[in-house]
Image (cartoon, rainbow, N blue to C red):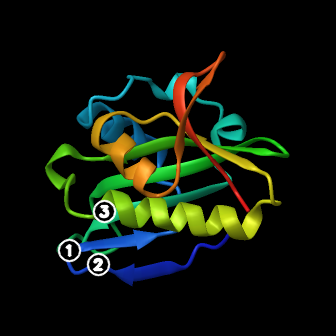
Amino acid sequence: MDTMNKMPELDVGFSLAEESPLLHELLSLRQTAGQARFNADQFDPDDTAPLYAVSARLDSAREPGSLAKLVGVVSVVEDMHRHLYIQDFIVMPQYQGSGLSRMMLERVLAFAQRRAAPGTCLRIHALGEDERLCHELGFVSSHCANLGPNLSKLLQ
C-alpha cells in the first residue's frame, strides 16, 4: 500500500483510510452488498493482498480499541507492469448515492496516476450506477476475453 495514513473525514459521517479491511470484514461486506460469496479458506493472503486499498467506515461510537463498521472498500491489484485492476469496489446498499463511491474511486485514480507509468491500463468490472460513475471519471467500455465486459482507463 502507498500509505496507511487516515484520510480526512467526510461530512456524511464516514472516514476514509488507505488500508485494507480485515478479511472477515471484506467477506461480510461482499455478502451484504450481494457480491460473489467466498469463505476465508479460499483466500491466500499473499495472493489477495492489494497494491492499494481505501476503506470507508462509519463515524460512530464504538468500543475502545475496536474498528468502526466497514461500509465500503475499493482495492487495486497489479496484474502485470502495465495493468492495474480494481478488484473490489463495494459500498453497502444503504450508503450508495451518498458520494462515497466517487470519493473512494477518485482516491484510487490519484494513487494510480502517482504509481503507474504512462500507458498503464486501469480496469474495473462495473454495472449500473457504478458503471455510470466510472464513465464520468474517464473510463471507457471495453471487452476482455478473460474478464468479459469491463471498463478501462489509460493512465497518462
Q: Name the residue under label 3.
A: 100
Q: Which residue is drawn at 45% across and 79% down?
A: 7
Mark closest to the chain's N terminus, 3 or 2:
2
- Using the numbered discs, state the Cα–Cα distance from disc 1 to disc 3 in whole angstroms: 10 Å
Where residue 18 sits: x, y (%)? 53, 68
**Residue that label 1 marks:** 13
Amino acid type at circle 3 is: Leu
Residue at 49% across / 33% down in the picture?
A: 125
Find the distance from the CA under tag 3 to the CA under tag 2: 9 Å
Against 32, is 116 above or below? below
Front in this rendered view, residue 129 or 40: 129
Q: Of residues 58 and 39, which is closer to you in this image?
A: 58
| Front of the two marks 1 and 3 | 3
Give percent across and percent down for residue 57.
31, 64
For the N terminus, give its image quadrant.
Answer: bottom right
Label 2–label 1 contact, CB within 8 A: yes
Cα–Cα span, label 2 and label 1? 6 Å
**Residue that label 2 marks:** 10
- Horizontal relation, residue 106 to residue 81: left or right: left
Q: How crowded is mark 1: few (under 14 residues within 10 Å), some or many (20 or more)?
A: few
Disc 3, disc 2: CB below 8 Å?
Answer: yes
The image quadrant of residue 98 is: bottom left
